Image (cartoon, rainbow, N blue to C red):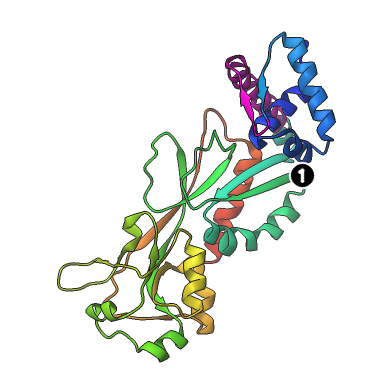
Amino acid sequence: MKTTLEELLTFTAVIDTGSLTAAADRLGQTASGVSRAMSRLEEKLGTTLLRRTTRRLELTEEGALFLGHARQILDAVEAAEDQMAARLECPAGKIRVNAASPFMLHVIVPKLAGFRAQYPEIDIELNTSDDLIDLIEQRTDLAIRIGNLRDSTLHARRLGRYPLRVLASPDYLKARGKPKTVEDLRKHSLIGFTQPASLNRWPLRHGAGEDYEISPGLCASSGETIRQLALAGHGIACLADFMTETDRQRGDLVQVLVKDTVEVLQPVHAVYYRNTEIAARIRVFLEYLVAAMREDG
């Protein structure tokens, strides 16, 4: 085999990061070194893999074909290393985790110290996204998804279920008054999500049913942004317990319309692709997360 693993890693890093400079930063190399490696690879293969323009890099048809093979080779090597590490009961390698920013900040990050102490050979890459991602395209090992699952091609493990509550800050309620009925919400500043629309149907019992569709005067795409807006006194919001428990304990957020609230438990799953045996590094992270969340109740 003329091509080396280092060249395959360089090639995939360039594609994943979008530039030679960013790939060099990821690999701990110089941009000129990455450029030379790409030139060597193209020379060995006798074809052009990338078209270089002033603004970006584009894959040629041959480059796109070779990229698929390169990823398969690297994944096979990584799987082989995982198996060897598992035999020694010492999981190692990198795990890439994706979650919405509130779950990442309030649930995963506080639990990392214990995991890293127990598994020092596992490197962790954390990425946040408030939209659903393609695990393969984003090179993600494990994604946390909140709400009902739709992708049947993924394997999933439920981590827990969290109640939804309608909340506001004491300062807001002091200034605007506390809503006594669901209909009173029309007189208030409501904070909602830009998407999906289902997140703007609050679990409140009223004359027309057991969910109340709001017309928010203030919107955000991230639950964490909505939480910060509520804490700052901008209005009333509906959020899951995992991101507001500390706020409620401190009295920074207060639940309203308690008697009208319908118990809705929002499911949280860890999802991953599983073609054969789940990699040891992913398995131990998932088991640790499940146990830590169980301790939290």
Placement of 287 over or under 112, stated as above or below: above
In this rendering, the count of numbered labels is: 1
The outermost residue toward the top is 46
Q: Is residue 86 visible?
A: yes
Q: Which of the two residues, 211 or 258, is positioned nearer the viewer here?
A: 211
Question: Residue 221 at x, y = what percent?
Answer: 45, 58
Which residue is located at x 74 percent, y 41 percent?
90
Q: Which residue carries the number 1 mark?
A: 121
Quadrant of res 264 = bottom left
Q: Is residue 252 left or right of residue 49?
A: left
Name the side, left or right, on which 27 lies relative to 154. right
Residue positioned most to the bottom = 174
Identify whether 5 is placed above or below 284: above
Magenta span has 99?
A: no
> Dot 1: few (<14), some (14–19), or many (≥20) neighbours within 10 Å?
some
Q: Nearer the viewer, residue 39 or 271?
A: 39
Q: Is residue 124 left or right of residue 133?
A: right
Residue 138 screen position, x and y as percent? 57, 38
Image quadrant containing the N terminus: top right
Q: In which image quadrant can residue 78 be found?
A: top right
Q: Which amino acid lies under the numbered mark 1 shown in the image of this protein? A: Glu
The residue located at (50%, 38%) in the rendering is 134
Quarter assignment of residue 137: top right
Report the front residue among 288 and 268: 268
Residue range highlighted in magenta: 54-83
Whether 74 is among the magenta residues is: yes
Which SS does the magenta portion mostly show?
A: helix
Residue name at image x 47 percent, y 46 percent: 157
